[in-house]
């Protein structure tokens, strides 16, 4: 049996989920990707054609300015496959205190001009590595992934990324390779730093622990394996009010490849528009006001379980 709906759950708990000051604008450049990862909540992959147009990218950059956001967080799919990515970075860099690009890294050694652009604007790179075990990582991300990922880390380390004192951040995002929650973020960071340096001679700046969200390809696997209700109950049983307070939907606005606004990347995957209305980025004058309502679904249990997580990693340690 599934737990009660998340919105009912927190209401009956006497808690509220509403916006704080929105500081980050997250932009999904499209669902085209060079990988078909088993945990992907957007079901991105080589067969997907959705890509943000140049015109929409310009509208995103304009909204970033008038919304007064601090950081621009660029994701996909594989955002480096979108030819409009360099233009968006060039324009947004004028106003952004921080730009983050989320990449699986494998294509970056083949795009030195793009990496040079990243270096020039001090773009922060965040890359997902599910496990230190090549077999486990490739079970989720495909054959040959691990060796190519390590090769890409070596290339980026050679460009200064992930090297202490360079000012070029290379962070790793780690998610479980199954229907369970990650262990302590700080303990994983210590272990990943030690093992990647010892076995492969590569380095990174920070490790961010993510929870698998029961959507997309991971949600389909949960359903087909009979684990969906059990996983939701596990998340509900680990509900943490403090994690809810730090949820990304309170401080972030997400934009999809067509330019429509959502409260977070997971609501984007579910088609739950921000404020319950289909609003295009070109129509939005400002960031959502503090206190504005947030659309919710049962996938929200993932962000509020255990240590919680945002796109910046665990919320409560």
Image (tube, rainbow, N blue to C red):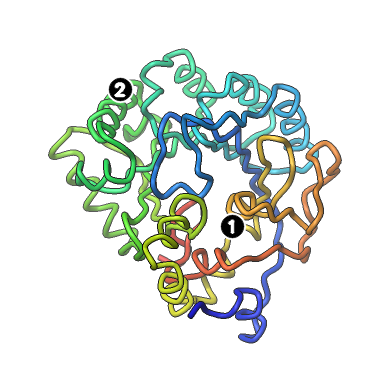
Q: Position of residue 217 (x, y in %)?
A: 46, 50
Q: For the point 45% across and 34% down, which residue is it?
A: 103
State which quadrant residue 15 falls in: bottom right
Rounded to the nearest whole Å, what is the CA distance between mark 2 and mark 1? 31 Å
* Disc sitting over residue 75 in the figure: none
Q: Does residue 16 appear to the left or right of 276 in the view shown?
A: left
Q: Nearer the viewer, residue 78 or 252?
A: 78
Q: How many marks overall? A: 2
Q: Is residue 285 above or below residue 22?
A: above
Q: Does residue 14 appear to the left or right of 238 in the view shown?
A: right
Q: Residues within 10 Å of mark 2 (few under 14, many from 20)?
A: some
Q: For the point 83% across and 43% down, which residue is it?
A: 284
Q: Nearer the viewer, residue 166 or 315?
A: 315
Q: Do the residues under discs 2 and 1 have CB atoms within 8 angstroms?
A: no
Q: Residue furthest front?
A: 224
Q: Does residue 40 appear to the left or right of 157 in the view shown?
A: right
Mark 2 highlights which residue?
Answer: 155
Provide the secondary structure element on which disc 2 rests.
helix
* Disc sitting over residue 248 in the figure: 1
Q: Is residue 116 above or below residue 218?
A: above
Q: Position of residue 285 (x, y in %)?
A: 86, 43
Q: Is residue 25 above or below residue 222?
A: above
Q: Position of residue 224 (x, y in %)?
A: 41, 60
């Amino acid at each position: 049996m599934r737990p009660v709906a998340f919105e009912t759950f927190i209401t009956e708990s006497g808690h509220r989920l509403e916006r704080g000051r929105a500081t980050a604008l997250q932009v999904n450049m499209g669902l085209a990707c060079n990988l078909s990862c088993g945990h992907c909540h957007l079901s991105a992959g080589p067969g997907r054609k959705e890509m943000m147009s140049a015109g929409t990218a310009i509208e995103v950059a304009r909204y970033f300015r008038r919304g007064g956001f601090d950081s621009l967080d660029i994701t996909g799919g594989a955002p480096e496959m979108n030819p409009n990515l360099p233009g968006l970075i060039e324009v947004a860099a004028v106003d952004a205190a921080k730009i983050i690009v989320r990449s699986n890294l494998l294509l970056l050694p083949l795009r030195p001009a793009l990496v040079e652009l990243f270096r020039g604007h001090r773009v922060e790179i965040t890359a997902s590595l599910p496990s230190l075990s090549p077999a486990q990582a490739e079970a989720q991300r495909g054959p040959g992934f691990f060796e190519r990922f390590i090769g890409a880390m070596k290339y980026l380390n050679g460009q200064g990324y992930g090297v202490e004192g360079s000012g070029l951040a290379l962070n790793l995002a780690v998610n479980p390779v199954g229907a369970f929650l990650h262990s302590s973020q700080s303990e994983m960071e210590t272990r990943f730093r030690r093992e990647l340096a010892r076995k492969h001679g590569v380095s990174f700046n920070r490790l961010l622990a993510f929870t698998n969200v029961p959507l997309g390809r991971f949600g389909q696997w949960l359903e087909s394996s009979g684990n969906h209700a059990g996983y939701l109950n596990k998340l509900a049983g680990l509900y943490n009010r403090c994690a809810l307070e730090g949820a990304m939907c309170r401080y972030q606005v997400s934009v999809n490849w067509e330019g429509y606004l959502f409260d977070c990347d997971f609501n984007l995957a579910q088609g739950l528009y921000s404020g319950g209305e289909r609003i295009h980025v070109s129509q939005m004058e400002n960031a959502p006001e503090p206190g504005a309502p947030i659309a919710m679904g049962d996938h929200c249990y993932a962000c509020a379980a255990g240590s919680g997580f945002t796109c910046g990693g665990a919320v409560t340690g």
